[in-house]
Amino acid sequence: GSNSIARVSQTGVVSTFSFTGATLNKPVGVAFAANGDLYVSNQGSGSTADGSIIRITPQGVASVFATGLLAPADIAFNGTDLFVTNSSGSGGTGVYRVTSAGVVSAYINNGIVTVPYGLAVAGNGDVYVGSGGNGRVSKKAPTGQVSTFLANGSLQSPMGMAFNGSDLYAAQSTSYTTSSIVKVASDRSITTYATGLNTPSGLAFLMPAVAVPEPGSITLVALGGLAGARLLRRRRAEA
């Protein structure tokens, strides 16, 4: 795969997002902080704790934010805390929490979720985790209670997830020809949002500090496996 990040302009022009100060090693998850910094998870070998999170400013200055992670995949912010899934499916933690100082701790232990991959945080602080092993989405409340949001088989390999308002978007990375992004409404109804993607993984909605979408549209970045990123923009009436 290509250890690079693609940037797509509002007019659809694709270019490589260049940065200095750190390197990518199998990037999988992406998330924007409130100040516009882009965070990227480096999966590494996937079998040892050589994964990391890097932080890239809008000016293209990169630095290592956290290290010593086992197969980090999708990432999402809750305030200043960054949550990270461990996609190895064995050993260590299912979901990490990383503070603004880069301190790593366990948030959800492995066994509660099966092969955790997709990750999203709702506005109320609930953490949603998609299981690549069985297509289930679990939810952990700030109080610590874990419950099932979508039952087994509801999604196909949810590799990346992101909230836009109360709607949950999930990247289903099933194959090179049938991968898609679906929208899960608050009533848990599921509709197709986008198709024709090449094994999408990390999803992130652009913060206003990064780009101003077209009026009445939503702007979503989809990290295409290990091959780069793609920007999707649709009118709200079509979403």
Image (spheres, rainbow, N blue to C red):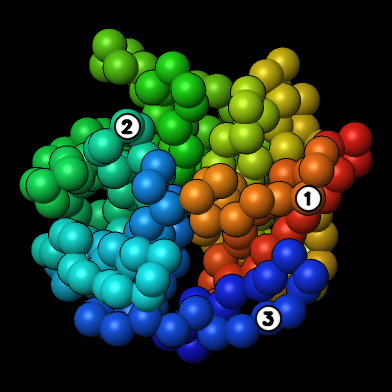
Question: Which residue type carries mark 1?
Answer: Glu
User: Quick one: 117 or 210, which is closer to the camera?
Assistant: 210
Looking at the rendered image, the disc whose residue lies closer to the viewer, 1 or 2, is: 1
Residue contact between numbered discs 1 and 2, judged by CB atoms under 8 Å = no
Above-or-below relation of 39 to 105: below
Q: Which residue is mark 2?
A: 79
In the picture, measured across the screen, residue 185 lies left or right of residue 67, that is right
In the picture, measured across the screen, residue 230 lies left or right of residue 111, that is right
Label 1 vs label 2: CA separation?
26 Å
Please tell me how crowded label 3 is: few (under 14), some (14-19), or many (20+) other residues with Cα within 10 Å: some
Q: Which disc, if any, is residue 37? A: none
Instruction: Name the residue: 77% across, 25% down.
Output: 189
Q: Earlier in the sequence, mark 1 or mark 2?
A: 2
Q: Which residue is mark 3?
A: 14
Instruction: Name the residue: 27% across, 11% down.
Output: 143
Q: Which residue is mark 1?
A: 214
User: Quick one: 152 or 103, which is closer to the camera?
Assistant: 103
Above-or-below relation of 29 to 19: above
Residue positioned most to the right: 238
